[in-house]
């Protein structure tokens, strides 16, 4: 999808909509957003490589503070995300179509599910589907005791941490961005999905801060994940070639994956990301089916059935569990809290990765109703996740018992090795599956980095459209950060920066809560004025007419006639007082109907909400 540039006429082709109705950034603000993130990221790199011990201690102290005093906040945040998603599905606003009533999906369902799953969880799920059930098999709260309670609880918590709630947290951010962009004509950025709920005087500064947080979180999150992906890919290669990990191998892996991602980013979503994501899905199905057929099939069927039932029985208790017995106590370290190891850490992870995951999901979801969007981003991936963990995790527990806790020992030594050790135990096809899993590590990370590059390009360049070369530069920059961290600091420094990025989710969670409140406000105040705006933003004929506004004799009579039909004609609608007509004085000022006007021409009259129809 292409959209109108802030300064030039609209692009041609099928991408004329949505028409730009967002804020034009002042030159100073754009300079801050463009220049300051690289400076701050370079400062972080210098700090953690020069004084890794001090940086690690500071990050650990921050993690202890967040875990000890704000576990309740992250639990509440996850509940709000789930509650808003449920409201969006079952309320009248669920029928609102992203991109207007005439918009249709740009991608088929298989491609859409493949891309949103690949950018959301693919790379992490590959390893934690084995590591989490193994690490939690002897230590998991809440799940009721039974004959196999310990292993059962490990599976149930794994479903919980990677399933519906995590996807609801991604979804609620994505739908905020999607409605703001596709329906209201805003840029696909956090600042424009958030700031108009704030007082007028604070919007400019708050918008810059919000965008800085999103950009820095995206770069550091992708870079540290790139470092770990390189190590995990090397571990996979070593499982069937005997190649030992070393800085030289990491360098080759990073360069190779960065090159593949750069090609994908250059060719765009339809020719790059979409095709690799579909390959991911096919290979994932092959891996799951092979483990199910050639592995302990009867045990898998039995354990999946039992743990699925236990998950649904314990879902509410797990969702509200804050470990209140430890609340308010001065814990000496986050390691003293079970939630510090697991739920709080994983929820922080999801929040920290929301900028690029949600931004990309929003970008590829034009044409779907909000109800279809929410179900597609929460229910469908959750079912896939549960099946994946049910098969891979159950097989890992089975082979772990059969090998005298051999997989547990491997995971304790290196988390990334658990999947490969488990696959080696699968008879007949185990060696082939090692190759498939290693390829999946590469392709899943390529799609994650590709989606991150597309989202980051929007954050940095909006409202101008970022070109393919700019996305390639972003990929190279992220690879350079990953390479610097891994070669100069080693795995400990990569872990420190990643943990710091994830703990940075604490302040960012307040930004997202504001954005959620703004979404609810926008959807509940879809006045006739807003409906007119949505129609005009997504009317391709009006967008095409705008191309001729700067040239005489290009059919302005037809344009005015059409606008008269769209807005109801009359002087009031042509004056720009509604902020809807493309030629009115408020067009492109960033003022949203029903909000304070940032234009010097003054504020529009506050519209009255529409009654129940």
Image (cartoon, grey):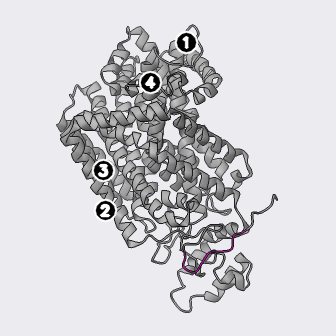
Left/right of residue 280 with respect to residue 515 in the rendered view: left
From the viewer's perspective, is the residue at label 3 or at label 2 nearer?
Answer: 2
**Boundaries of the magenta span:** 599-607
Q: Residue at x 70, y 56 (%)?
A: 524
| Nearer to me, 155 or 570 | 570
- Circle 4: element type: loop
Q: CA distance from mark 1 to mark 2?
A: 53 Å
Which quarter shows the C terminus? bottom right
Give me the disc on residue 337: 4
In the picture of the structure, the residue carrying the numbered disc 1 is: 149
Q: Residue at x 55, y 60 (%)?
A: 198
Image coords of residue 225 (percent x, y): 35, 40
Q: CA distance from mark 1 to mark 3?
A: 43 Å
Up-down: is 149 above or below 380? above
Q: Earlier in the sequence, mark 1 or mark 3?
A: 1
Image coords of residue 134 (percent x, y): 43, 19
- Circle 3: element type: helix
Circles 4 and 2, Cβ within 8 Å, touching? The answer is no
């Amino acid at each position: 999808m292409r959209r109108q540039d802030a300064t030039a006429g609209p692009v041609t082709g099928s991408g004329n909509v949505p028409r730009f109705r967002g804020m034009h950034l002042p030159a100073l603000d754009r300079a801050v957003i463009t220049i300051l993130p690289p400076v701050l990221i370079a400062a972080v790199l210098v700090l953690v490589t020069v004084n890794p011990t001090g940086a690690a201690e500071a990050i650990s102290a921050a993690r202890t503070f967040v875990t000890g005093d704000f576990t309740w906040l992250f639990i509440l945040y996850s509940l709000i995300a789930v509650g808003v998603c449920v409201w969006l599905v079952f309320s009248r606003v669920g029928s609102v179509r992203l991109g207007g009533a005439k918009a249709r999906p740009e991608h088929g369902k298989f491609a859409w599910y493949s891309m949103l799953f690949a950018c959301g969880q693919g790379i992490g799920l590959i390893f934690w589907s084995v590591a989490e059930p193994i690490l939690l098999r002897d230590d998991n709260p809440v799940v009721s005791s039974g004959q196999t309670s310990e292993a059962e609880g490990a599976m149930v918590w794994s479903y919980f941490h990677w399933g519906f709630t995590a996807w609801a947290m991604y979804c609620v951010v994505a739908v905020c961005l999607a409605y703001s962009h596709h329906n209201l004509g805003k840029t696909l950025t956090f600042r424009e999905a958030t700031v108009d709920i704030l007082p007028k005087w604070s919007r400019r500064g708050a918008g810059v801060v919000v965008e800085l947080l999103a950009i820095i979180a995206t770069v550091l999150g992708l870079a540290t994940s790139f470092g770990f992906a390189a190590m995990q890919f090397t571990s996979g290669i070593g499982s069937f070639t005997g190649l030992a990990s070393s800085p030289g191998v990491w360098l080759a892996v990073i360069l190779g994956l960065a090159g593949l991602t750069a090609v994908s980013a250059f060719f765009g979503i339809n020719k790059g990301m979409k095709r690799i994501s579909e390959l991911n899905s096919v290979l994932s199905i092959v891996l799951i089916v092979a483990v199910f057929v050639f592995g302990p099939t009867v045990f898998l069927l039995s354990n999946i059935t039992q743990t699925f039932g236990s998950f649904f029985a314990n879902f509410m208790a797990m969702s509200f569990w804050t470990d209140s017995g430890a609340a308010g106590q001065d814990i000496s370290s986050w390691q003293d809290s079970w939630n510090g190891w697991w739920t709080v850490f994983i929820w922080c992870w999801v929040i920290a990765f929301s900028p690029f995951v949600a931004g990309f999901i929003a970008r590829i979801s034009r044409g779907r109703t909000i109800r279809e969007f929410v179900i597609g981003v929460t229910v469908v991936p959750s079912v896939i996740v549960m099946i994946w963990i049910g098969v891979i995790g159950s097989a890992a527990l089975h082979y772990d018992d059969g090998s005298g806790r051999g997989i547990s020992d491997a995971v304790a030594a290196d988390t990334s090795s658990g999947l490969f050790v488990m696959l080696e135990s699968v008879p007949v096809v185990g060696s082939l599956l090692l190759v498939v899993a290693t390829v999946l590590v590469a392709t899943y990370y390529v799609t994650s980095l590709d989606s991150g590059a597309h989202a980051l390009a929007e954050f940095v360049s909006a409202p101008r459209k970022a070109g393919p070369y700019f996305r390639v530069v972003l990929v190279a920059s992220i690879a350079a950060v990953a390479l610097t961290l891994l070669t100069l600091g080693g795995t400990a420094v990569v872990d420190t920066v990643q943990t710091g990025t994830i703990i940075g989710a604490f302040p960012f969670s307040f930004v997202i809560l504001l954005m959620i409140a703004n979404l609810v406000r926008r959807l509940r105040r879809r006045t006739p004025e807003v409906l007119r705006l949505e129609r005009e933003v997504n009317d391709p004929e009006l967008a095409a007419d705008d191309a001729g506004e700067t040239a005489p004799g290009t059919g302005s009579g037809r344009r005015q006639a059409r606008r008269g039909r769209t807005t109801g004609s009359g002087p009031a609608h042509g004056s720009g007082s509604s902020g809807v007509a493309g030629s009115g004085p408020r067009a492109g000022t960033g003022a949203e109907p029903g909000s304070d006007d940032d234009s010097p021409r003054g504020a529009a009259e506050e519209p009255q909400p529409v009654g129940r129809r």
